[in-house]
Amino acid sequence: MVRKAVIFDFDGVLVDSERAHMWSILQAIEPEGWSADPEAMFQEFVGTSDRYCFTVLGKRHGVPMTEDLHATLVARKLERFLEAVDDGRVTPHEGGFELLRSAAERVPVVVCTGSRRATVLPVLEKHGVLDALVGVVAADDVGKTKPDPEAYRTACAVAGHEPGDCVAIEDTEHGIASGVGAGLRVIAVKHTYQDERLSAASDVVDRIGEITVEDLLGR
């Protein structure tokens, strides 16, 4: 089947940023007197939203999540994450941006991410691919983030095609669940997790650099 649009996840697919996100979350919660194990956070929270992470961590410390507290934590995390970007701790996965540009020459391409726009747009702009996209769907743009299908349904609407005509590239079970639930074909890359956590995808490859435009579009 020929696919008419390509939708890329961002963190863990196009860029190696998951550890930087976890570090930024730890920095954000430290002034509250909260703590968490970095590796346990990585296994639990990768592929989820900031709100989910902060709500769970707050609950574990006996603190309910208010809108004011959430806004404070998000602002702290953003500041630290952008610091990590400036320091070169967020790096492209080899072949990812090249594949995005090649796909964009043939079909609409959208980035669909569980992160906030403020953490995504500066990186896309820095690497010169923002103009190649027809849109970005971030956590700010949907009522429910991954693993809910809303994010990918929204991304397909931005691309101008039905979900069954679109293909997504993901790296986490939450992202795969969102894409499959919306009706897309999903290709998983083993940048973050191994096969057992990616089994719901249509195909699994080691690295995004192994994927060709023909693999995505079926032609």
Image (cartoon, grey):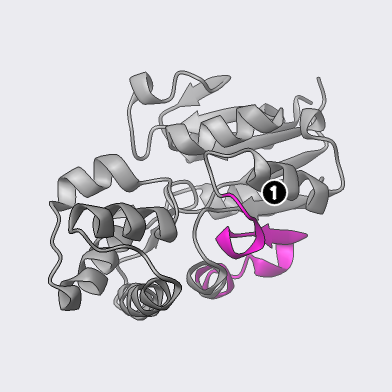
Q: Position of residue 49 (x, y in %)?
A: 45, 54
Q: Position of residue 167 (x, y in %)?
A: 69, 34
From the viewer's perspective, is 116 left or right of 69?
A: right
The answer to if 136 sits in the magenta stretch is yes
From the viewer's perspective, is 138 left or right of 207?
A: right
Quarter holding residue 15:
bottom left
From the viewer's perspective, is 137 left or right of 116?
A: right
Q: Is residue 70 above or below residue 165?
A: below
* Front residue of 9 and 66: 66
Q: Position of residue 109 (x, y in %)?
A: 73, 51
Q: Is residue 84 above or below residue 151?
A: below
Q: Which residues are magenta?
A: 123-144
Q: Which residue is mark 1?
A: 102
Tell me the residue at 45%/18% (across/down).
199
Q: Is residue 219 above or below residue 121?
A: above
Residue 131 in view (yes/no): yes
The answer to if 46 sits in the magenta stretch is no
Tell me the residue at 36%/64% (across/down).
65
Quarter holding residue 217:
top right
Q: Amino acid at mark 1?
A: Ser
* Front residue of 169 and 64: 64
Number of labels in the image equals 1
Tell me the residue at 48%/70% (across/down).
119
